[in-house]
Image (tube, grey):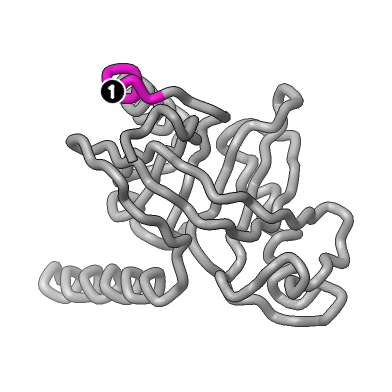
């Protein structure tokens, strides 16, 4: 029986990997690399964002439906918008609230992105920015997020890189991706003057 299960699991993993790598990812340029830490420059891009009151582990699920509806045509143009990666989660100014964002395809600008039908969805243009980044594989628990966030902050301190914003958690894979293959990143905005460009 095992000889049949193993090829099935392998095939499922390959299909999952192919599906996730076929979508557009938020582009960046690597300016510096130090061990597992990167300093990246991101160009201006559009986000669709939902604010939710939830704990860390539930925030993404709670925000998913209005965001998915928006890209599925729940907008002023009834236009379908391609799914991209990553899904970004960051703390809101209010305690206990989170901002969950879908990155919009790069061919959309503020004037061309359809207006959401739902008041829950807010679209915004993000300016060009520098980010410190740490990539890791594995599950989506808050403990793993905090573990890698601490590693990135420690490395930034050693490199004299100053944070200019809240940490962001970037998830690149869908829930059906086996947990041990999921690509995740911690992103922290940097002050321009802290990076040797």
Q: Is residue 156 magenta-colored?
A: yes
Q: Position of residue 109 (x, y in %)?
A: 68, 69
- Residue 132 higher or lower than 30, as above or below: above
Q: Secondary structure at mark 1?
A: loop
Q: Where does the magenta region start and end?
A: 155-161
* Residue at x-position 59% and y-position 59%: 45
Quadrant of the snapshot with the N terminus: bottom left
* Residue at x-position 57% and y-position 29%: 165
* Residue at x-position 45% and y-position 64%: 25
Bin the neighbour count of mark 1 within 10 Å (Cα to Cα): few under 14, some 14-19, many 20 and up: few
Q: Position of residue 123 (x, y in %)?
A: 75, 57
Looking at this view, is 137 or 129 the one in front? Answer: 129
* Residue at x-position 29% and y-position 55%: 181
Looking at this view, is 1 or 142 the one in front? Answer: 142
Quadrant of the snapshot with the C terminus: top left
- Residue 77 higher or lower than 42, as above or below: below
Looking at this view, is 143 or 79 the one in front? Answer: 79
Q: Is residue 28 left or right of residue 135?
A: right
Q: In which quarter of the view is residue 69 placed?
A: bottom right
Looking at this view, is 51 or 57 the one in front? Answer: 51
Q: Which residue is mark 1?
A: 159
Q: Is residue 43 left or right of residue 67?
A: left
- Residue 40 higher or lower than 94, as above or below: below
Q: Position of residue 131 (x, y in %)?
A: 44, 40
How many numbered discs? 1
């Amino acid at each position: 029986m095992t000889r049949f299960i193993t090829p099935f699991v392998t095939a499922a993993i390959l299909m999952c990997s192919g599906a996730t790598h076929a979508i557009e990812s938020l582009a960046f340029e690597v300016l510096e690399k130090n061990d597992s830490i990167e300093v990246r420059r991101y160009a201006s891009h559009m986000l669709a964002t939902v604010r939710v009151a939830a704990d860390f582990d539930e925030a993404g699920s709670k925000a998913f439906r209005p965001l998915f509806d928006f890209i599925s045509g729940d907008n002023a143009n009834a236009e379908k918008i391609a799914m991209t990666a990553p899904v970004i989660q960051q703390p809101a100014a209010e305690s206990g609230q989170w901002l969950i964002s879908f990155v919009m395809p790069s061919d959309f600008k503020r004037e061309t992105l359809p207006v959401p039908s739902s008041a829950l969805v807010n679209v915004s243009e993000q300016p060009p920015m520098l980010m410190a980044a740490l990539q890791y594989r594995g599950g989506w628990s808050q403990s793993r997020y905090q573990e890698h966030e601490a590693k990135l902050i420690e490395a930034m301190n050693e490199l004299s890189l100053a944070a200019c914003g809240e940490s962001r958690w970037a998830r690149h894979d869908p829930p059906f991706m086996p947990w041990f293959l999921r690509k995740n990143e911690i992103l922290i905005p940097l002050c321009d003057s802290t990076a040797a460009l």
